[in-house]
């Protein structure tokens, strides 16, 4: 997140970095997504202690470690590595204020939010649109998402605002004779 200062007494915002907006600006074939359509997004939160989490993860798969195959419950994981109750409460209040329903997943690192496109647009400072690229229709947003600056350092990504991606699977399948 990049933070923008407050302007005219409005709360400062933090902008999520992404590379979607420049691609969308390049196409003129945009159509607004219906504001009454219901969408689901996932807010991916940062671990409170990513270094310790990384060490723990490697230790659980190292046969020489005392933590080998010693896994945490989602609740214990959340207490140790997930976001604090205070941070979760702040984000949930923000979502509720924008008429979005939510569910916090065990581990306290993902919040699934859902609601009408009009409310998602307001909550994240975006406009969800449909674009046509090389004959395929995608949903994406026209501006980088913005959230209150108090969320800076707490959120890694917001998933679900766009299904446009330049990556393609290399998965191949082979038909088997029966």
Image: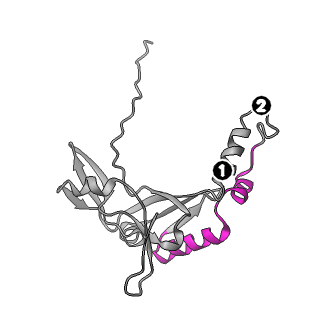
In this view, the residue in front, 81 or 42, is 81
Please name the residue shown 35% across and 70% down the image. Answer: 118
Q: Position of residue 59 (x, y in %)?
A: 73, 39
Circle number at residue 34: none
Determine the secondary structure under disc 1: helix
In this view, the residue in front, 100 or 9, is 9
Q: Position of residue 54 (x, y in %)?
A: 66, 46
Q: Is residue 87 above or below residue 157?
A: below
Nearest-to-viewer mark from 1 and 2: 1
Q: Is residue 133 above or below residue 64?
A: below
Residue at the top extreme, as displayed: 177
Q: Position of residue 150 (x, y in %)?
A: 53, 73
Residue range in magenta is 71-100
Q: Is residue 57 left or right of residue 160?
A: right
Sort mark 1 into few (<14), some (14-19) or many (20+) by Cα contacts within 10 Å: few
Which residue corresponds to mark 1?
A: 51
Please name the residue shown 82% across and 39% down the image. Answer: 66
Which residue corresponds to mark 2?
A: 63
Is 15 magenta? The answer is no
Q: Is residue 147 above or below residue 131?
A: below
Is 82 magenta? The answer is yes
* Image quadrant where residue 68 sits: top right
């Amino acid at each position: 997140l990049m933070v923008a200062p407050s302007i005219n007494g409005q709360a400062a915002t933090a902008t999520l970095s992404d590379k979607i907006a420049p691609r969308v600006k390049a196409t003129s074939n945009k159509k607004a997504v219906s504001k009454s359509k219901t969408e689901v997004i996932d807010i991916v939160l940062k671990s409170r202690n990513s270094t310790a989490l990384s060490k723990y993860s490697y230790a659980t798969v190292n046969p020489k470690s005392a933590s080998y195959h010693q896994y945490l419950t989602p609740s214990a994981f959340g207490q140790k590595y997930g976001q604090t109750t205070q941070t979760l409460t702040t984000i949930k209040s923000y979502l509720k204020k924008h008429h979005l329903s939510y569910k916090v997943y065990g581990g306290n690192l993902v919040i699934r939010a859902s609601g009408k496109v009009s409310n998602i647009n307001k909550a994240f400072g975006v406009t969800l649109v449909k674009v046509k690229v090389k004959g395929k229709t995608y949903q994406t947003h026209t501006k980088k998402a913005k959230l209150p600056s108090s969320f800076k350092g707490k959120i890694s990504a917001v998933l679900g605002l766009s299904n446009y991606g330049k990556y393609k699977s290399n998965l191949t399948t082979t038909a088997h004779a029966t």
